[in-house]
Amino acid sequence: MGAHGIETAGVDVQKLITILNEALSEEWLAYYQYWIGARLMEGPMRSEIEPELLLHATQELNHAVLVVGRIIQLGGTPVTHPADWFKLSKCEYEAPLDPYVEAVLKQNLNGERCAIKRYKDLADFTNGKDHTTHQMATTILGEELEHEQDIEDWINDIKRMKEDMKKLRA
């Protein structure tokens, strides 16, 4: 982005770059959490949920691409070392130590809820000021909200399946 574009952003650009690097770190961690969780997951509905979690992982990677692009447009440098992801991220990375499908889904749900807060806060910070970042943030926010709904639906489906199995045994 040219100097005039940066000047007209209407926000503290250095603060925005810091926020975007935090978001970038969170996206990389979310990508890996989804990807490795999908690969290790065990239990009911695994074959239906795994491809969807891999799709979510790809979408998280696409979010990282958008965020990197915006950091560079603003004249910043994206976080360059994976070790810094943990330092910058405000969202917790939860390793899928328990591969049971519900445990993996609950971990991903926690991550999505953190991402929803991240992009809502970013959209609020840039609203009416930096239209480009605001549009990016609201686009990503929409996808994070869809991810949350998908995960909640799968958790509810598994819960319902367990309840139905209990009724059959009774």
Image (spheres, helix red, strand yellow):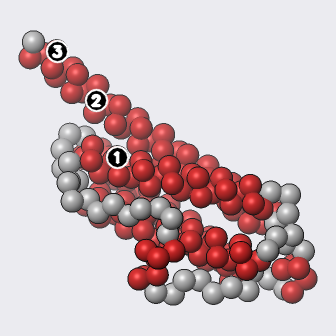
Q: Nearer the viewer, mark 1 or mark 3?
A: 1
Q: Which residue is mark 2?
A: 159
* Residue projecting furthest to the left: 169
- CA distance for labels 3 and 2: 13 Å
Q: Are marks 2 and 1 in contact (CB under 8 Å)?
A: no
Please give the name of the residue rendered at 44% of the width and 41% of the height, measured from the top-left corner: 150
Nearer-the-camera pick, 86 or 159: 86
Upstream in sequence: badge 1 or badge 3: 1
Classify residue 41 as left or right of residue 60.
left
Residue 156 is left or right of residue 96, and the answer is: right
Under mark 3, the amino acid is: Lys
- Distance in Å between CA atoms under marks 1 and 3: 25 Å
Kindly indicate the quadrant of the structure image that contains residue 63: bottom right
Mark whose residue sits in front, 2 or 1: 1
For numbered disc 3, what is the local secondary structure?
helix
Which quarter of the rendered picture does the C terminus lie within?
top left
Which dot marks residue 167?
A: 3
Q: Secondary structure at mark 2?
A: helix
Please provide percent x and percent y for residue 95. 29, 63
Query: Which residue is disc 1 drawn over?
Result: 106
How many other residues sit within 10 Å of disc 3, few (<14), some (14-19) or many (≥20)?
few
